[in-house]
Amino acid sequence: MPRPADLRLRWHRTTLDGRTAVYGEAGDGPPVIFIHGWGLSARSYAKALPLIAASGHRVIAPALPGFGRSDELPGEYTFEKLAYWMDNLLDHIGVDEPAALVGHSFGGGVATATAWHHRERARSLTLVNSVGGSVWKDADGLAARSLADRPLWDWGLHLPAEFRPPGLGGRRPWRASRKALPVVVRDIVTNALTNPGAVWRAADLARRADLRDELAELAERGLPVAIVWGAEDTVVPEATFLAMCDAAGARGDIIEDAGHSWLLMDPVGFGEVVTNSIAVRDTVSDRTPRGAAARTSRLDRPA
């Protein structure tokens, strides 16, 4: 089995409907499609994805339209439009078998939409700190409201909490935060300067994302779904995570001492979580009955 160090992502540029599309690729074997979060690009996860490839998979990590040097799409951004773009890309690069779809944050919404609109593309679905539950709770924790009611400035206020050093409320290692922060800042600033319209439209779509009906239908079709959430995530609230688990009838896994961007700070742990999730989803046969209460388990971050 090849070592992760020997499986660096190879970057490719192609054209879809006359627009540039960029994607990274590593490894050989059953396909794993990794879809990045809002404001970032596939390059943000370059340390984690070779670990997944080393387990015997062909990892493909596209830069979504308007991010990471992929040209933006015209008009309003919708999950259906992004799912069509994903299907077009996979067809263009020769992915001709169902893939394990993995999405982080906004990318989780795109992964869900791709599985729903193009069922033949999905072998399994793994959502990591994903949008799509559309439930938000007020500060008192009592009044449930739609996530669409949460203003964009409130999302922005919570992003810095992902990188707080010890003594300011953060429990995650400051060294890891210092490594991840430049990656996040670089990608967000670059994307905002290059394609500000796409960044804004994607942010608004993420804020309004309600994919619970799609998740419920995917579960009815028998698609294996895993939903993972970091216990310290201040961007995607716990209520959203639980709503998605309930809709999919899936057992949710809560990663302790992990925020919204924990996979950037701990690429080794993330690689292990995703590899294990894909292995389980590939062999799962028993499904949680639709309509059953969501179940969760708490996991320590892999050592």
Image (cartoon, rainbow, N blue to C red):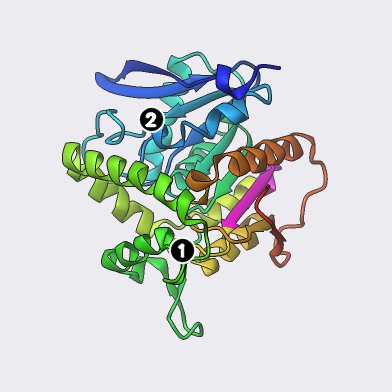
**In this view, 302 is above or below 6:** below
What is the x, y in percent for residue 75? 21, 41
**Quarter assignment of residue 96:** top right
Q: Earlier in the sequence, mark 2 or mark 1?
A: 2
Could one spot residue 285 in this view of the protein? yes
Taking the image as shown, residue 13 lies to the left or right of residue 265, namely left
The one of 142 and 81 positioned closer to us in this rendering: 142
Taking the image as shown, residue 282 lies to the left or right of residue 261, namely right
**In this view, 67 is above or below 226:** above
Mark 1: secondary structure: loop
Identify which amino acid the numbered label 1 is placed on.
Ser
What is the x, y in percent for residue 105? 46, 50
Asked whether 84 falls inside the magenta stretch, the response is: no
Taking the image as shown, residue 150 lies to the left or right of residue 171, namely left
Other residues around mark 1 within 10 Å, as few (<14) / some (14–19) / many (≥20):
many
x 56%, y 61%: residue: 241
What residue span does the magenta drawing correspond to? Answer: 219-229
Other residues around mark 2 within 10 Å, as few (<14) / some (14–19) / many (≥20):
many
**In this view, 30 is above or below 152:** above
x 82%, y 47%: residue: 286
Is label 2 in contact with label 1 (beta carbons under 8 Å)? no
Residue at mark 1: 134
Q: How many marks?
A: 2
**In this view, 238 is above or below 281:** below
Residue at mark 2: 85
What is the x, y in percent for residue 49? 54, 31
Per the model, the C-alpha gap separating discs 2 and 1 is 24 Å
Identify which amino acid the numbered label 2 is placed on.
Trp
Mark 2: secondary structure: helix
